[in-house]
Amino acid sequence: MPESVRGSSALGKRSGKSSWSGYLITAIMERYLTMLLLLLLLVQHFGNCEGNQIPHHASPMQFTQVQYNATVYENSAAKTYVGHPVKMGIYIRNPLWDIRYKIISGDNENLFKAEEYVLGNFCFLRIRTKGGNTAILNREVKDHYILTVKAVEKHTNTEARTKVRVQVLDTNDLRPLFSPTSYSVSLPENTAIRTSIARVSATDADIGTNGEFYYSFKERTDMFAIHPTSGVVVVTGRLDYSEAKLYEMEILAVDRGMKLYGSSGISSMARLTVHIEQANEHAPVITAVALASSESDKDPTYAVVTVEDNDQGSNGEIASLSIVAGDPLQQFKTLRSVPGGKEYKIKAVGHIDWESQPFGYNLTLQAKDKGYPSRFSSVKVIHVTSPQFKSGPVRFEKDVYRAEISEFAPPNTPVIMIKAQHASHLEVEVMTSDRKASAKVLIKVVSMNSNPPEFMQTSYKASFDENVPVGTSVMRVSAKDPDEGENGYVTYSIANLNPLPFVINHFSGIISTSEDLDYELMPRVYNLRIRASDWGTPYRREVEVPVTITLNNLNDNIPLFEKINCEGTIPRDLGVGEQITTVSAIDADELQLVRYQIESGNELDLFSLNPNSGVLSLKQPLIDGLGAKVSFHSLRITATDGENFARPLYINITIAASRKPVDLQCEETGVAKMLAEKLLQANKLHSRGEIEDAFFDTHSVNMHPPQFRRTLPTSVEIREDEPVSSSIILVNATDLDTGFNGKLVYAISGGNDDSHFIVDMETGMLKVLSPLDREVRDAYTLNITVYDLGIPQKSAWRLLDVKILDANDNRPEFLQNSYFVEVSESKELNSDIIQIEAIDRDLGPNGEVKYFLLTDTDIFTVDSVTGVVKVVGALDREIQHVHFLKIEARDQPNEEPQLFSTVLLKVSLEDINDNPPQFIPSNYHVKIREDLPEGTIITWLEAYDPDLGQSSQVRYSLLDNGDGTFDVDKLSGAIRIVQRLDFERKQVYNLTVRAKDKGKPVSLSSTCYVEVEVVDVNENLHPPQFSIFADKGLVKEDAPIGSSVMTISAYDEDGGRDGEIKYSIRDGSGVGVFRIDEEKVMGNIVVDKLSTTEKKQNGSVGGEQLKNG
């Protein structure tokens, strides 16, 4: 609420009313005779006098406006009057009126009260806040009220109504609030200066200036800065993880009104935590080991890959390992061996198409770490081999092959010979040493009959039983041939000269019997030579293996008695134990023991038969006991080999009474003679076929080595410009063997390391394979070797000297591919900087070299004879830091065309500290508000030094810091406010800033000027206010112009110029009659125009105070 209406009281209203009544009585007493005339004049005066704003046709009592606008500040104290730009109320047309005001609606909270104040002919409507325990005004709850005010004339009860719109003005009663109240960010230590890292946010429910606030750090820091209005936090210093890993800062949101109202209180605070992380300096490194998988593996692992990263923390953790090439169908995937680990396995996603890639896949891998920003490893190529690749993995004889090739080498020039085993196809990738170019070479090895069959065993042994049926399989032999097609197709045969009771299946190698075999009548051991032959061309390859077959003996013969049907007598008194006879049986089976036994006839147990020897003896006496009663015995005796029983032998024994010797007669069977004849026949069979051991196969043995013809010369001559594929000499040889043993192939086995020559493998013609160069090598000694294809292989060799004749075919060659020299930019003129040298390996004038500078320049020259390069012009690294000079070397032949070559010379200029830093722009102009908080960056300085190294590193300093009001960050160039600004104290600062480099031995510097203009912030918070709402004064009607009528006073709570007051008369019936001194401390109202009581008995003026602020 304007202070002009604050503090008024009801006392003023009562005193104004009493003054009006006294004046009326005095006028009646003085002019009682002219009362009627006076009343008429008064009516005429109220209707027509100056400043009367009552319409001619208005109702008897009416407010000056249908609606008024008023203002009042929230949280105003009790009995605070609202302010209004125009006077509110009713003109008094009848001096007898007694008007009262009352608020009849719009004040549900009972916050306001209407009062009347009479001054002259006007009854003012005044509205104030109520006192007591009523609620206070709160703009944030309700920002305006529309009050309906009723005016009632006390005597006549005449009514009038108006509306007053009371606008509640904002006061700075709320503080800013952060949301959230804490912030946390993580930064890599290499975060650039001026990088925005966070943004804090606060809100203030007040409006206008009261709702504005500034952000600032509670404590000063040189590492960070915060924008006062946006809340954006930026980096202002160089972060270093080793020095500080954590920054904790408190951020203030300071209400702008705090400064304006003279308070330095803190409105709100938030916390910012900055974590510093190590920079991601290292890229991951991949190491991989390919694994050979098997078709039987259900989930094979094709490779194990390890990824290492030397960074710490998350920078050293691996985010992913990806297959970036070589897998267009995405058939493979990478899986970590353990969660979070650095080991990965290459697995299959599903079915892999090995048919289209029978030799496997070349997968290109690349790893990525978790750092910020992420870094990627170099690519790593691994070869995944198909499990269906039967020939096995390719194995080269060497892990690394090194070769050199001339840039003149034509297509198809052999580079180097590499050897790999167990592969029908080879894929070779040839790459230049700088890895800028590569090519794939696909080699198909054409299969020839180069391998003989090979048995699975060096010898075979088997055994089988005699008497097996003809055609019984005894054993199987097996041989394999690694050659392809018919060259590897194997058949079998028996190589023995004499017939044997066996046959072999030519295709399966199964050996079976062809005759009935009897162990007793045929050889018991058979030695076979089994031959395996391939079907190759032009000759078959054969190999033999010994096979031993043993015939097992079976128990297939029954014992046969030598004597049968024996009859005779024995005396009765034959002693117990005495021998009666011996039985004998023969078994044709070897090592079969025959046992004897009595089957019947010995029921009285009178006789005993030895089971092993066959001796029959008396067991019990025959003269007494049971034996005495019987005189005839018939014994049935048999023999057995354990399985078979002989036909029974009968011995009939008669007991004689007289004592006679034992007398038995038997029939001879002739078994022994018959067995002897069979054994004699078997012995003859055993000796058959033994002469085979002396057999020698002259057709399968490589007996003769190759031989060169005697007319082959020992040396030849050839010009170095001889075309490629030119024939040099035919070196042929002969071999007396036949078949593969006599088949010859030729090769250069030595002296041809640079692959300039080749010999036709079949014919032996020596040819030029690649261009010759006498200057590189003027003679060769070639070892020409001829091999036969027999087993074991035999060879012969011959040394051939090849002399290379000269031709003019060489250009001058610089000693280096390019030249580089560093020269100080302050190098003196005509100074030597480098010598370029080229050599021509030709002879005579063809080898004489002169030099020429092809680059168009006036700064350098080259001596045509010595090749010395000199400086002849001024150097300036900042204008051009490097010069590329193209220099030509040309030979000087007499007749043939000149040959030349060029080289590039790079001249790099070394920096000297010859440039001071330059400000961009050269001077600065900044406008800032005076209420910005301390620590605020008002501008960033930019200075550029074109020098290098420390000479380009700029440090800033203030030569004039504005009486300590500002400072500058020496690294970032940020100018900060370090002391409070005050527009009333100083409006402009002229700062002098110096930028100085760190060059040695002398550093250079430059200065610039920063003009800081302080912008005034409106601190004119309080309006002027009169000490009273209304005042009165008297003046004589004949008072001369300039006479003082009365003095009024107003005051202003603002200080300085904002508190200076000017007075003026704004409106009222006294406008033009009176004037007021404008710029006096007191407002003295004086007469400005002559006035008479007849014309105007009283006048009112409306005063206005103007502030200079």
Image (cartoon, rainbow, N blue to C red):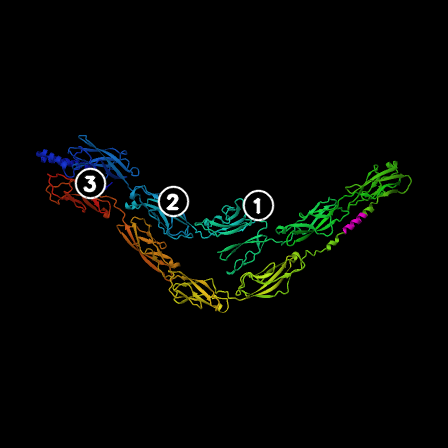
The answer to whether residue 76 is left or right of residue 296 is left
**Quarter occupied by residue 23:** top left
- Real-space CA distance between mark 2 and mark 1, rounded to the nearest whole angstrom: 57 Å
Please state which of the two labelled residues, at mark 3 or mark 1, is closer to the viewer: 1
Q: In this view, does 471 lie above or below 905?
A: above
Q: In the image, which disc is placed on residue 297?
A: 1
Residue position marked by numbered label 3 in the rendering = 1028
Q: Position of residue 422 (x, y in %)?
A: 59, 52
From which residue to which does the magenta span run?
677-687
Q: In the image, which disc is placed on residue 182?
A: 2
- Real-space CA distance between mark 3 and mark 1, rounded to the nearest whole angstrom: 107 Å
Q: Quadrant of the N terminus?
A: top left
Question: Is-magenta flag for residue 517?
Answer: no
Q: Position of residue 818 (x, y in %)?
A: 46, 62
Q: How many marks?
A: 3
Q: In this view, does 57 lie above or below 1012?
A: above
